[in-house]
Image (spheres, helix red, strand yellow):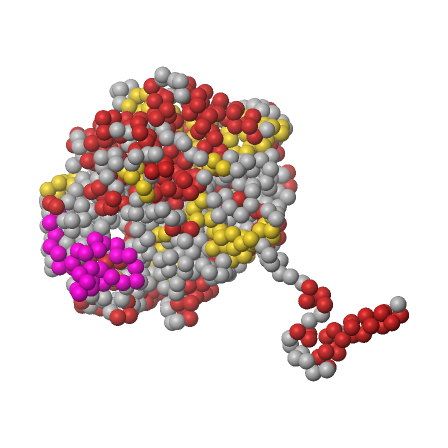
Amino acid sequence: MGSNFAECHPVGFRFVMLAREKGAEVIHVDPRFTRTSACATKYAQIRAGTDIAFLGAIIRHILESEQWRTDPFFQDYVRHYTNAATLIEEDFRDVADLGGLFSGWRQDYYCPDTWQYAGMQRVLNLADRQEEICRLKTTQSWGMHAGRTVGGPPRRDESMQHPRCVLQILRRHFAPYTADEAARICGVPAERIVDIADTLLRNSGRDRTSSVAYAVGWTQHTTGPQMIACSAILQLLLGNIGRPGGGIQPLRGHATIQGSTDIPTLYDLLPGYLHMPTHLPIDVGLDTYVWNEGGATGVWAHTRSYMVSLLKSYYGEHATAENEFGYQWLPRIHRDFSHMPMFVDMHAGRMEGFILMGQNPAVGGPNARFHREALGRLKWLVVRDLFLTESATFWERAPEVQAGEVRPEDIETEVFVLPAASVLEKDGSFTNTHRLIQWHHSAVEPPGEARSDAWFVVHLGRRLKARAAGSAAERDAGLRALTWDYPVHGPLEEPDMDYVLREINGYRWPDDPARREPLETALHLADDGSTACGCWIYCGVHPGTNRAASREPDDYVSPGWGFAWPNNIRLLYNRCSADPSGQPWSPHKKYVWWDERERRWVGADVPDFPPDKPPDAPGDPSLGGLEGFAGDWPFVMKPDGRAWLFFPNGMKDGPMPTHYEPWETPVENPLYAAHGRNPETRIWEVAGNAYHGIGDPRFPFVLTTYRLTEHHTGGGMTRWNSWLAELQPEAFVELSPELAGALKIANGGWVTVVTARGRAPARALVTRRLRPLRVMGREIHQVGMPWHFGYEGLVRGSAANELVALVGEPNVTIHEGKVLTCNLVAGRDGAAERPGAP
Amino acid sequence: MGRSLLRRASATLDRWPVLRQLAGEDPDRAAAASDRTRELRPRTDETRTVASVCPYCAVGCGTAVHVREGRVVDVEGDPRSPINQGTLCPKGADIFQYAVNPNRLTTTLYRAPRGTRWERVSLAWAMERIADRLQDTRDRTWTAADREGRPLRHTTAVGMLGGAALDNEENYLIKKLCVGLGVIGVENQARI
């Protein structure tokens, strides 16, 4: 679901096809009938953005089924490995009681104190600041990690019958999600939903596992993370997590999307998912920061070691116990400053300078014209890319400039364009979708003045550090302390990337590079400044040799091919592949198990568990860390060692997934009339970003955007390549024969897609891949448009992002690019006069 | 002279695949190859092969980059990779066009405020000027604390946005430098 696997990750899809050849069922649920649907054994056409209603009906069907309730496998897995038996606070109220809101709602944000385990309290260092944390609305989640809860241990009812235990709360929560109700919401026939639920049930259990794959079709929604959470609930109920052939596969959309959150270039994170400190008192010092970030139990109990080692790699000899290892030099965040709010600031003239590296928001950003206008209000802009992208030429080539609405002479922005080196021309690593870190070697020198982005950053940093060297200003103290001794080589003075990877991996102090002793595992990280580590979850990637560059395949999980973080574990939480007593659930699904003779966990993979903790070890949280874990608590990242079917912390918009309509929708939410859309949705009511109302008669159709095999993202890496340009030469809009007939639009003719943000003329592709759906007793038409095009390159066409709004999901502020409403107008809509169009 | 011509013609005839096959040599093997075929060499012959990874989607297909005399002559799927086993999709098969593509940017360009054209500038000039701009904006807009005196130590007037084909090491350096500068506006394609 939420993925067109066959067309967007075609080489990975080979494995799905191999499984199908061996008899596996392949289920595809998508608004469009794609090549993935054509390769599936079962297909459901769904209204875009209603995935939680669909999954909710499947969860309900499974919870109520005789097979699930009586099969000891499901019951044992769920009882031991999830929080199904844990009791929740008495004050918790579900959405059914409060018209679409959970308890804890404070006008425009949630405070999660009623979502806690019974007898435990979420305590921030300064309890009276809790409200302020919730109100801050950054994309940080208070408690995404361990959360600091006190009291306990959590109360449990091993029979899972107590009305306040998670399983019963879950059962009541999903009770309204009948197959018939989901059918009305999603436009999928009820019998097909039931058939898919039964298929999943039949293909899960002791001897079988099912896997869920999703992509940006799930994430780009105002309920995106909750859709993924909903699939996690489904997979946990079916015992499909931590077992071979199971899991949830996030099909990342770009080479190192995974890596760029692990080692983030994100405003709210430091490497290894440590939070950037805020200006609030909870982050006033290293001690309070660690107290709030870490927990007492689980892997996060060692947060101080991770943070101190990071500070040591940032500030080197200047990081000492006396100065909190330089913690006070860290900049503080004070609000959401992610992509969209940053461009809103830019649009309002509150930013002066911006540096783009391989990103093309002039056509790739939601509400593309808004992004171009924002770029035009900067004083200076640096664009580094392989080609002369739309973000470099917006001042002379944007549709509004060509239409004469904006004059280049009126755009103040000073633009620097620096040619970038491609993957063929640099050393470095990607972290691919499976957490697999793979090194690529430079094959040739970059052409002309092209340089790697590392070259740009290292040499820019050298200049800025040199200028700050003699400064006594307080603002320069952190910059002066920053270690920046990166060696360069060759006539181009490109930085030595192996050296950088070694800094990321970590080493023992002292800092003398010649005497650096690399670390082998994050278990060796210390909190006293005796280790440095640029990203604790990557520790082990370079224990003297570059394991990311290792290329030794085998015919199973290939531990010798690249390095998977953490600790080269290929399958996370793989303790779950054995039963509570440590034995394989079945010979067929044997993966990691307890060897009684060797007294350790053994198998095909590195155990994601303390290697010599026996399965019958009792839990004693007072011991802290993983030492206090019982032998059957497989989820080492969670403070209670169990996977969460109910989320006491971590999600801002509720402790369980709930069907909310997309921000722009043709219909009301039949479940919760008063709060039909996600109440925490982030909106920006600014000029140029008007929204459509619910059921807005001006915009009656549902629009979804998508990718083609032959182009990539906003087209910045493909539209300048002649082979690909020839394969996919033009923008188009997909619509059903029924809608085309009603609007008198001919296949191959022109059609203009219209929203309150913009217009996008393109060729009509009239196809039965899209069908009208029956939703809430009405006929709903869906329309699709690929989003790769723009006004530069060998192939040009309307950017779908001209249509999309700035609207954000509350946990991560991702935009809702996969569903919005629109109108269609036959013809080119004066596009002949709009040179940006084809 | 005439005799040598005859000898050459006879030698040519001897190698003529049709005659050799008629004479009973294995019709599927060496006998079927013409002189031209025998002299043909694969494009990847005598090249240096460099292990790389596809920069498009996140499946992580291994690639083998064939290099001769400092030039890329071919890019193909790495047959050793357990991920793609030598295969590539249309985009992956097009990585070659990063190396051989007249549309690649190879010079530094500058557009002055309110300018109507590009100017060629040197990379060193641009780097110095960018450092000037960044330092000036950052120093002028530095905010040490908010009105309540809570520490901020940052500027919100500068931002960076990177694509998700930046290497992990590059992201590490970007974040580290931004932390040093107090630039909190660091974002990535991974967000949206």
State which quarter of the image contains the C terminus of chain A: top right
Q: Residue at x 39, y 42 (%)?
A: A501
Q: Residue at x 43, y 27 (%)?
A: B158
- Spot occupied by residue A442 in the image (x, y as percentages of width and height): 51, 46
Q: Is residue A58 above or below residue A681?
A: below
Q: Is residue A828 above or below residue A599?
A: above
Q: Is residue A657 left or right of residue A452?
A: left
- Spot occupied by residue B172 in the image (x, y as percentages of width and height): 39, 38
**Tag count in the figure?**
0
Q: Residue at x 72, y 82 (%)?
A: B23
State which quarter of the image contains the N terminus of chain A: bottom left
Extent of the magenta region: A593-621
Residue situated in front as seen by the camera: A166 or B148: B148
Q: Residue at x 22, y 41 (%)?
A: A302
Q: Is residue A626 left or right of residue A673?
A: left
Residue situated in front as seen by the camera: A676 or A796: A796
Residue at the outermost right position = B2
- Spot occupied by residue A668 in the image (x, y as percentages of width and height): 34, 47
Q: Is residue A613 magenta?
A: yes
Q: Is residue A351 at all visible to an observer of this figure?
A: no
- Spot occupied by residue A790 in the image (x, y as percentages of width and height): 56, 42
Q: Is residue A219 magenta?
A: no
Residue at the outermost top position = A472
Q: Is residue A302 at all visible to an observer of this figure?
A: yes
Q: Is residue B172 left or right of residue A374?
A: left
> Which secondary structure dominates the residues rendered in magenta?
loop
Q: Is residue A788 above or below residue A61?
A: above
**Quarter of the figure with residue A748:** bottom right
Q: Is residue A369 left or right of residue B154?
A: right
